[in-house]
Image: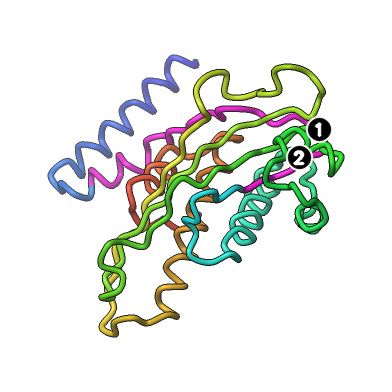
Amino acid sequence: MRGAIRTTLAVLLGSAAFAICGCGPQFGALLYYMTPEQKNKADFKLAPGRLAILIDDPYGSLPRSDLRVQLYNTLVRELEANKIPAAVVPLSDMAKVEQNTRDFDSMSIRAVGEQVRADQVLHILIISFTTGVDASHGVYSGSARAVVKICTTERKPAVRVWPAGGDGFVVEVKQPREQIDEWGNKQAADAYADSITERLGKRIAMLFYEHSAEAEEDLTAGRGEKPKS
């Protein structure tokens, strides 16, 4: 009985394919939607517990200081939306430590996390952030690059949890090229920088949950993101 059902189904699918095979693009579109979406697995799974997000910009790459807040907010939103079990330390707690610690810049990642009673620290080191070499002329072609790692706050010689080697996991995103007629438009420049920051936050969050391979490629290759169905 099951064999008969499989045979009938195969005939129906074959007939459908034959009926539209001469339609070219339509058949290609059908195959696209029938093909299962490719998924990329999480590079690292965050454990339950308090997670501090520490964003460092040692080279002054970010054009505005509030972009650090935006990056933090994007990360929290994406992690929560994808049901990551970690409880993120409020940004206000991180800000208090930074403001009240005279030698904050020389503190270790582990020590900062310990100050806010975190179990682990998601450390993000901004390497570069640009809106493009011709941004002053209204032609934006931006990108951002960061190094990411997870550290424990346990007091032990090796605090790095992930990745095992190197300086960290390098994340890079590109923003689709845009052009405006008015040169030096600050509002347009700010909006474009906001978009780059948003993409960087989304890409970093993807490290910690299974996600669409196409969505990841869109962020890294500078393609416009497709709306979620």
Task: Give the residue type that dot 1 points to.
Answer: Asp
Residue 150 placement: quadrant: top right
Measured along the vertical axis of the image, is residue 209 above or below residue 222? Answer: above
Residue at 27% from the left image edge and 62% from the top image edge: 133
Foreground of the two, 41 or 163: 163
Residue at 36% from the left image edge and 62% from the top image edge: 131
Image coordinates of residue 6 in percent, x first then y, are 42, 21
Residue 204 placement: quadrant: top right
Task: Give the residue type that dot 2 points to.
Answer: Leu
Foreground of the two, 214 or 43: 43
Image coordinates of residue 201 in percent, x first then y, are 55, 51
Question: Dot 2 corresponds to which residue?
Answer: 51
The answer to whether the residue labelled 2 contacts the one labelled 1, judged by CB atoms less than 8 Å apart, is: yes
From where the camera sits, is residue 229 visible? no
Q: Which mark is residue 119?
A: 1
Q: SS class of the residue under badge 2?
A: strand
Image coordinates of residue 7 in percent, x first then y, are 37, 20
From where the camera sits, is residue 34 visible? yes
Foreground of the two, 108 or 141: 108
Residue at 32% from the left image edge and 42% from the top image edge: 32
Q: Which residues are magenta?
A: 27-55
Image coordinates of residue 48 in percent, x first then y, are 80, 32
- Which residue extends farthest front? 102
Q: Does the magenta-highlighted stretch encompass residue 96? A: no
Q: SS class of the residue under badge 1?
A: loop
Q: Is residue 123 left or right of residue 86?
A: left
Q: CA distance from mark 2 to mark 1?
A: 6 Å
Q: Does the magenta-highlighted stretch encompass residue 28? A: yes
